[in-house]
Amino acid sequence: MNDTLQESKNYLHDNWEKGVECPCCKQFVKLYRRKITGAMALALVELYKENKRVGFSEYIHLAELLDKKGYSYQITNTGDKAKLKYWGLVDPMQGTREDGSKKVGRYRITQLGIDFVKGEAHIHEIVGLYNQHVYRVDNNRLITINEVWDTKFNYHELMKGY
């Protein structure tokens, strides 16, 4: 490889919207456009109700809560509800589980999440994600919770990217 590290970084940044292989490590690099979905909003509402019941400082195991409420596998066992953090709607519990995983699955709703559930706040419809970080919030449409109920996850839209 003859490229400097900075040249490689520039190449990745210039091409990550369509997706590209990293010249250094061969990892696929892509900036993904994520929309909040109705299932994510439903999980947020249930988290709000549970946090209201037990206290807003408490972390709730969201998958267990949704399973207890009788929601389908598609809602209880997807990673989408964890993505609520990218809009600042939930606060994930830090730390590790007994198996060493950092993903403990426990969340508490943020003030923005509370306001969003109540219809008092708007969020960006789309965020740009790479490697579990928000790298772009385009000047896209601001939405309320009432505008997301019919939004479903769309794999082809996600893979299309920017």
Image (cartoon, helix red, strand yellow):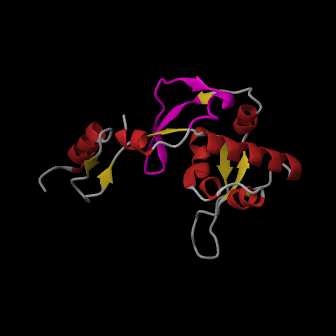
- The part of the image, by quadrant, that contains residue 110 is top right
Inspect this view and state whether residue 13 appears.
yes
Per the image, is 128 magenta? yes
The residue furthest right is: 53
Which residue range is magenta in the image? 124-151
Instruction: Name the quarter where the N terminus is drawn.
Output: bottom left
Q: How many marks?
A: 0
- The part of the image, by quadrant, that contains residue 103 is bottom right
Relative side of 46 to 72, left or right: right
- The part of the image, by quadrant, that contains residue 102 is bottom right
The residue furthest bottom is: 99
Query: 1 or 81, which is in the foreground?
Result: 81
State the image coordinates of residue 128 (x, y, percent, origin top left): 45, 38
Above or below — where is 104 with respect to 91? below
Instruction: Name the quarter where the C terminus is drawn.
Output: top left
Above or below — where is 34 with respect to 1? above
State the image coordinates of residue 118 (x, y, percent, origin top left): 77, 31
Residue at 57%, 47% in the rendered image: 83
Inspect this view and state whether residue 56 appears.
no
Residue at 77%, 56% in the rendered image: 69
Per the image, is 85 magenta? no
State the image coordinates of residue 2 (x, y, percent, origin top left): 11, 53
Residue at 63%, 44% in the rendered image: 40
State the image coordinates of residue 59 (x, y, percent, origin top left): 75, 56
Query: 15 or 40, which is in the foreground?
Result: 40
